[in-house]
């Protein structure tokens, strides 16, 4: 895909993988709508990328994705700025060390990592269809687990940070599989990618970052990759002609990889969609 005349939306674009993907898109001449939660950090990232790439077609949008009202407001702003949207990268993710709920009564990890991209993508489908062929890329993680479908919102379980994170990211695989069925024949594709293990600010100021990556480094001694290396896997799904007609798959290192058993179950895919639809009141979109 030639990106010179394309419009892309990247969430979590002010740091880490999101910023690296935004940089790669900008360097290739794309118009990039960068979504960040914090205005000051977002503006700093925007100016840095403009200076680094010489691309003035970069714009900053501010939204706290754990708020469904802000996700809806973001979708309206995007629709006004970009009647056609060629690329959507659902990258923003976090982890919370303690149980917390959003203003919508949703456990915050689930709200940001799964329900926000679920809602945002559904709200932007008209713009994506108008730009077809267009691509949706969901950022996942390497997991072999299952969601507790009877309690996605952690109302009846003892909260565990990494379990909540893994389940929320598994939700993205269910979402990818079910959405692919729903948009067949529209010219829009959706795939999920595991970008590898890399240095990130997972959890940011909420405190999870230090705990998580310090544990990884101490226990495994990994030399973590830079976000730019991880971004190469995302860019493959964005621009490679080899995946232009591929949809509903799970990628890692520029190839299709195996799905966890639960994500291969069409009934589970449909159930996660139905629960998600209810939790975000999609009918009110």
Image (cartoon, rainbow, N blue to C red):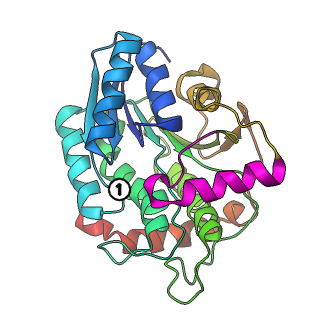
The residue sitting at 46% across, 32% down in the picture is 19
Give the prevailing secondary structure in the magenta stretch. Answer: helix
Q: Position of residue 203 (x, y in %)?
A: 50, 55
Report the magenta residues as a range.
199-220
- Is residue 86 something one can see in this rendering? yes
106 vs 207, left or right, is: left
Q: Quadrant of residue 118?
A: bottom left
Is residue 270 shown above or below 28?
A: below
Task: Tell me if residue 84 can be seen.
Answer: no
Q: Residue at x 54, y 73 (%)?
A: 271
- Nearer-the-camera pick, 181 or 23: 23
- The percent position of residue 274, horizontal first and vertical second, equals 46, 72
Q: Is residue 20 above or below residue 181?
A: above
In the foreground, 170 or 256:
170
Q: Is residue 210 above or below residue 97?
A: above
* Residue occupying the point 62% across, 78% down: 148
Q: Which is more toward the observer, 90 or 222?
A: 222
**Of residues 130 and 26, the one drawn nearer to the viewer in this rendering:** 26
Does residue 149 appear left or right of residue 221 in this picture?
left
Is 110 left or right of 250, judged from the image as shown? left
Where is mark 1, residue-wise?
A: 65
Q: Residue 8 appears in which quarter of the rendering?
A: top left
Please state, as top left, top right, bottom left or bottom right, where the C terminus lies in the image.
bottom left
Is 199 left, or right, of 142 in this rendering? Answer: left
Q: x and y percent of residue 193 in the render?
A: 62, 42
Label 1, residues with CA under 10 Å away: few <14, some 14-19, many ≥20: many
Q: Secondary structure at mark 1?
A: loop
The image shows residue 114 at horizontal and vertical percentages of 48, 60
Q: Is residue 230 magenta?
A: no
Task: State the residue lying farthest toward the left.
Answer: 80
Report if residue 219 lies within the magenta region: yes
| Residue 43, image quadrant | top left
């Amino acid at each position: 895909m030639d990106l010179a005349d394309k419009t892309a939306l990247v969430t979590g674009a002010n740091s880490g993988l999101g910023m690296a993907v935004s940089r790669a898109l900008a360097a290739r001449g794309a118009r990039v709508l960068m979504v960040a939660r914090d205005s000051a950090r977002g503006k700093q990232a925007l100016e840095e990328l403009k200076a680094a790439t010489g691309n003035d077609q970069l714009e900053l949008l501010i939204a706290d994705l754990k708020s469904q009202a802000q996700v809806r407001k973001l979708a309206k702003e995007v629709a006004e700025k970009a009647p056609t949207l060629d690329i959507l990268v659902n990258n923003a993710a976090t982890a919370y060390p303690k149980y917390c709920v959003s203003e919508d009564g949703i456990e915050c990890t689930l709200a940001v990592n799964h329900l926000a991209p679920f809602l945002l993508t559904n709200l932007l489908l008209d713009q994506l269809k108008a730009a077809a062929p267009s691509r949706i890329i969901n950022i996942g993680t390497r997991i072999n687990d299952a969601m507790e479908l009877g309690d996605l919102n952690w109302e009846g379980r003892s909260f565990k940070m990494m379990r909540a994170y893994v389940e929320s990211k598994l939700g993205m695989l269910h979402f990818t599989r079910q959405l692919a069925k729903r948009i067949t024949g529209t010219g829009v594709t959706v795939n999920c990618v595991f970008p590898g293990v890399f240095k990130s600010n997972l959890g940011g100021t909420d405190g999870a970052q230090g705990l998580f990556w310090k544990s990884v480094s101490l226990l495994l001694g990994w030399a973590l990759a830079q976000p730019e290396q991880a971004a190469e896997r995302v860019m493959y799904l964005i621009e490679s002609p080899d995946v232009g007609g591929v949809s509903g798959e799970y990628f890692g290192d520029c190839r299709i990889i195996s799905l966890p058993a639960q994500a291969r179950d069409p009934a589970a895919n449909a159930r996660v969609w139905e629960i998600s639809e209810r939790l975000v009141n999609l009918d009110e979109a």
